[in-house]
Amino acid sequence: MTPPAPDRPGAVPTPKPTIRNVAERAGVSKSLVSLVMRGSPHVSERRRQAVLKAARELGYRPNAVARSLVEGRTRLIGAIVADLHNPFFAEFLDGLQESLHGEGLRMLVGSGRWDPLFEAEAVEAFLEMRVDGLVLLSVVPDSLNEAAASVPVVVVGERDVGGVDIVVDDDELGASLAVDHLVELGHRRIAHIEGARSTTARYRRAGYEAAMARHGLADQVIVEPGDFTEEGGYRAARALLTREPRPTAIFAPNDLVATGALSAADELGLKVPGDVSIVGYDNTHLAAIRHISLTSVDQPRRDMGRAAAEMLCARIDVPGKEPRQTLVMPHLVVRSTTGPVAAGAL
């Protein structure tokens, strides 16, 4: 009688292959199979390939839970970003994952959605999964100190925190580069859209205001409340571009906000950069799209991801070392959304 197929009711599941099965098929010991599955360098290439071939043939997959119990670690890293819709975060994660993979670590991603409740839930979920470390990008939950007491933590983009390693862009310098560029083009009425609650937004605003004062334009400072979304940029830019006198330039806190500002200008029948110049921040792939061609302040996001991975791995290896801060330097990438101030606009 033919036995029932596995997908039929009453079928008996086929037993999963074990590490012992792999060892017998490869003609090696169970301990050597374990070394291969952990990625140990202390195995000859010939034996490694024999074990991997046997594992493929048998359909064997290591039991990650069992391995974590034996090793006392999961080799999982939790990465929490403020907004999965922002391409800056995606490009940062590319650099982070690339470096973590090289260290034999796997990355899990969660979103804080600029909401303290979601941030706290994401942190707690990763801690319950026993991750080996956390990377928090523009996220500083109230439970940060408790989390850092449990696992190594690296905070990215937020500098006013203590007791953890930090990777941060020089936001004040970046804002200054944007204002300097616009002033060189003859602009005086330069407005700034402020980002969502964060030290990033605060430092970019401070850099904008300091640069305006340095150029003798303190009386021309215009700050419109906003956030870090495209919709927020659209609303803020509409408010700025319908006031009198209208700003001749807008410095946005990121590229998403800048694209929202471009939409607002287009809807109002204003030419960019003929009627208004717009500068973004982050220099994401959005900025380089040809029909957008956005002038933007570049912060090396993939390098920041690699730096965060390096700091986290170092913290895992030596938990008690003093916290470090890595400061990356931005630079301005000039494209088509900025130009000389229009004659008579001043």
Image (spheres, rainbow, N blue to C red):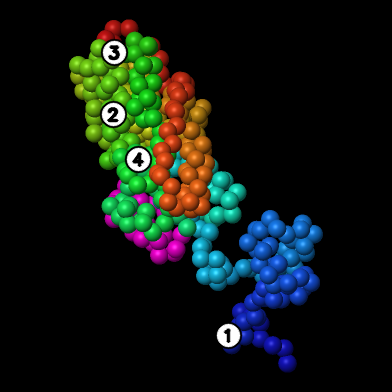
Label 1 sits on what residue type?
Pro
**How many residues crowd mark 2 within 10 Å: few (<14), some (14–19), many (20+)?**
many
Kindly state the secondary structure of the residue where label 3 is placed: loop
Q: Earlier in the sequence, mark 3 or mark 4?
A: 4
**Mark 4 surroundings within 10 Å by alpha-carbon count, few (fewer than 14), some (14 through 19), many (20 or more):** many
User: Mark 3 vs mark 2: which is more N-terminal?
Assistant: 2
Q: Secondary structure at mark 2?
A: helix
Gap in angstroms between the C-alphas marked 1 and 4: 55 Å
Q: Are marks 3 and 1 in contact (CB under 8 Å)?
A: no
Amino acid under label 2? Answer: Arg
Residue 205 numbered tag: 2
* Magenta range: 110-131
Question: Residue 134, relative to residue 72: is it above or below?
Answer: above
Name above or below for residue 262 compared with residue 107: above
Which of the labelled discs sits on residue 130, or is there none? none
Q: Which residue is mark 1?
A: 9
Q: Which residue is mark 3?
A: 215
